[in-house]
């Protein structure tokens, strides 16, 4: 049973630092061996690749471009009339992925057009999405890359987003039927939309290519107050054989990388202090008769 591997999401972590090169250095010095970033396109890929090498990091995930954010776009994969722009963005994402050695690209579905009724345009948007995904699967296969579909919750985060449940995403993946397209599991979004995390993780994990985590409802780090039991969820991912990365996509409640200083409590309320200097055990979880304690972190 392999220990979980964590990647720093540089679009969320180290917000006090400006620019991706500075955040790459911070992630490397914090002990990470892998990072992910939503949109790396403000920096030349060669600059980012050099900064990642110098920090001893590998990129594991980027997103396709969001489109025209001033017009409210947040991805283009399912947006009618924007097929050409989606394909141009895909080409850009592939160029960056190749330069950065990044094996996965999140193919952003996008939002229901402003003023449109979701139920009225759902069928048309799915047709567009299927068409774009089939095209993307072919392009990505030529470069040995994987495309990911991420449901984003429409209750809190983005009410207009087209793809909002793992059930919807899995049904679309089945219709496309391409092995290099997989599901991206953001536990924050899944909990808000459907709950039933144990059942959904077990059902959909075979088609999951990447996992992201944040506490609910505050979207802080897993050790922040909230409704999710992350020692249990991390152990579940391990037990079910997940071998990919777990992306730290959260708003830090402390300074910088918090898990080396934050506290976890076991079932009895006893306090265990974590330290980056602690020796690492074979697994990030220690079993007790009273339950599980997250003992340290495994990065890489």
Image (cartoon, rainbow, N blue to C red):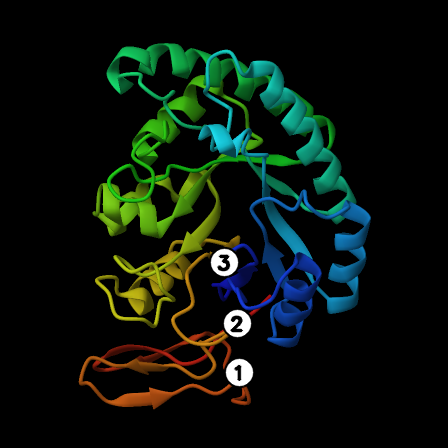
Q: Name above or below for residue 282 compared with residue 139.
A: below
Label located before the other in sequence (1 or 2): 1
Q: Is residue 254 left or right of residue 116?
A: right
Q: What residue does disc 2 label? A: 298
- Foreground disc of the pair 1, 3: 3
Label located before the other in sequence (1 or 3): 3
Q: Is residue 242 left or right of residue 265?
A: right
Of 57 and 16, the residue lying toward us: 16
Q: Position of residue 283 (x, y in %)?
A: 46, 74
Q: For residue 172, which quarter of the picture?
A: top left
Identify the residue at horizontal 58%, vertical 31% (top origin).
Answer: 180
Label located before the other in sequence (2 or 3): 3
Q: What residue does disc 1 label? A: 280
One can see residue 93 in this view: yes
Quarter placement of the C terminus: bottom right
Q: Position of residue 193 (x, y in %)?
A: 24, 41
The disc placed on residue 12 is 3
- Foreground disc of the pair 2, 3: 3
Crowding around mark 3 (Cα neighbors within 10 Å: few <14, some 14 to 19, many 20+) is some
Circles 2 and 3: CB atoms closer than 8 Å: no
- Residue lying furthest front in this view? 70
Circles 1 and 2: CB atoms closer than 8 Å: yes
């Amino acid at each position: 049973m392999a220990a979980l591997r964590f990647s720093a999401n540089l679009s969320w972590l180290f917000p006090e630092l400006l620019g991706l090169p500075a955040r790459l250095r911070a992630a490397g010095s914090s002990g990470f061996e892998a990072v992910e970033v939503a949109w790396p396109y403000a920096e030349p890929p060669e600059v980012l690749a050099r900064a990642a090498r110098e920090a001893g990091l590998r990129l594991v995930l980027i997103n396709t471009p969001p489109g025209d954010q001033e017009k409210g776009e947040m991805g283009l994969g399912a947006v009618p009339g924007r097929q050409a722009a989606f394909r141009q963005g895909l080409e850009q994402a592939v160029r960056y992925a190749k330069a950065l050695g990044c094996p996965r690209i999140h193919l952003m579905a996008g939002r229901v057009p402003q003023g449109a009724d979701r139920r009225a345009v759902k069928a048309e948007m799915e047709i567009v999405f299927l068409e774009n995904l089939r095209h993307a699967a072919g392009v990505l296969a030529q470069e040995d890359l994987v495309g990911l579909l991420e449901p984003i919750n429409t209750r809190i985060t983005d009410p207009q987003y087209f793809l909002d449940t793992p059930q919807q995403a899995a049904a679309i993946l089945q219709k496309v039927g391409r092995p290099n397209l997989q599901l991206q599991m953001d536990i924050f979004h899944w909990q808000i939309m459907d709950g039933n995390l144990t059942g959904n993780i077990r059902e959909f994990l075979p088609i999951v290519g990447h996992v992201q985590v944040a506490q609910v409802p505050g979207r802080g780090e897993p050790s922040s107050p909230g409704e999710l039991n992350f020692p249990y969820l991390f152990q579940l991912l391990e037990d079910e054989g997940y071998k990919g990365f777990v992306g730290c996509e959260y708003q830090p409640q402390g300074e910088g990388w918090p898990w080396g200083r934050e506290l976890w409590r076991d079932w009895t309320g006893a306090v265990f202090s974590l330290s980056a200097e602690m020796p690492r055990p074979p697994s990030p979880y220690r079993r007790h008769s009273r339950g599980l304690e997250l003992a340290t972190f495994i990065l890489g």
